[in-house]
Image (tube, grey):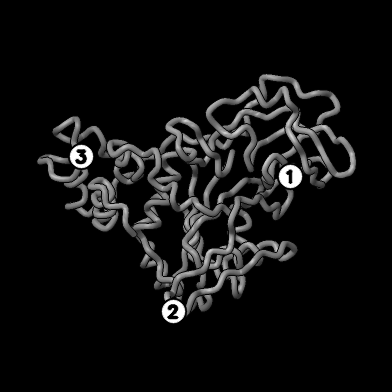
Amino acid sequence: MAKTGKRSRSDAPLPASPETPPADAMSGIVTRAHGLWFDVHLRADDRTLMSTVRGSVKRERRRTDLVAVGDRVWVNDVGEGEGQIVLIEPRVRSLGRLARHTRDVEQVILANPDQALFLFAMKEPTPHLRMLDRFLILAESRDLPAIIGINKIDNPETDLAEAEAFMSDYVPMYPIRYVSAKTGFGIEELKHDLAGKVTVVAGPSGVGKSSLLNRIDPTIERIVGVISDATGKGRHTTTSTILYEIADETFVADTPGIRALALQGVAPDELPDCFPEFRPYLGDCFYADCTHLHEPRCAIQQAVERGEISRERFESYASLRRGDTSD
């Protein structure tokens, strides 16, 4: 197989704010939003202040949420467990969507994620690879490193080989972690992946996201979703983005609504670059504006025929390029 191209990615810390924080302000991260109030977890002393935003700060940002979960901020402690946000650091990236009834105003679901964990299960519900591809496109379009997690490997002796075969097309491009929230299999390796980062966790309902987070950090209780016997699909249990600190400077974000973001803001001609295995061949087609669907002398289609690109992944691309967004 041809070597997979990679976009340049940076794991560098947040850029320095153009302003100097006040001497008495403390650094923190926004972990939850409550209307005009924000929970700010302080880095220095492991406590949270419910904070409002100083009036002068409210004039600083346009066409996006002033403060969002994941923002790095500076706050003053005003007493009785409350704070005032006096400075918001620049965002490296954000997961967001257009606000309703607007064309250029961003509604931020999560600010400054370092990586994404897309969690699926080998059973109940059966994994849907087209949905996984949409999640991966979301990550690629935001230049966000992605990890694929496969849960419910409860009996590795029988489940692991089946899962590895099922995920073989993704091995050259993405790290894959096989885990069991039930038994703890693979959890330590996954903890290592998450350490020191803000990770957005997403996946279809019923795959065990809450159970997995509870297994990683038993000190924080979460509602564990259940599979509907009638439909085989999980019932939604989370309604707003929350950052959970599972270790020192290690956060996971349970983010409802991320599934709807998958193709937002990705133009059809940008889709090929969101498939990492396509990148070594981009620019080699006979036609400069090749869609890689039907044109002759297409380098992507030729790579598929030679077995260098998975036919299933190509069909997923072709379906999306033609405008089929159904699951």
Q: What percent of the width, then of the height, locates residue 71? A: 65, 37
Cβ atoms under marks 1 and 3 closer than 8 Å: no
Q: 287 or 169: nearer the eye?
A: 287
Q: Give residue 164's position: percent from left, percent from top.
A: 41, 66
Q: Secondary structure at mark 1?
A: strand
Classify residue 194 as left or right of residue 117: right
Q: Which residue is mark 3?
A: 291
Q: Position of residue 72 (x, y in %)?
A: 68, 35
- Residue 279 can be seen, yes or no: no
Tag 3: amino acid: Thr
Is residue 189 among what the camera can see? yes
Residue 5, quarter of the rendered image? top left
The image position of residue 96, as x and y in percent, is: 50, 40
Q: 230 left or right of 226?
A: left
On residue 280, the disc is none
Q: Is residue 324 above or below residue 101?
A: below
Q: Residue at x 49, y 36 (%)?
A: 9
Mark 2 residue element: loop
Q: Which residue is mark 2?
A: 230
For label 1, count other residues whose C-alpha is less than 10 Å away and answer few (under 14), some (14-19) or many (20+).
many
Q: In the rendered image, which residue does mark 1 sit on? A: 39
Residue 317 in the image: above or below residue 213: above
Badge 3: residue crowd in 10 Å (few <14, some 14–19, many ≥20)? some
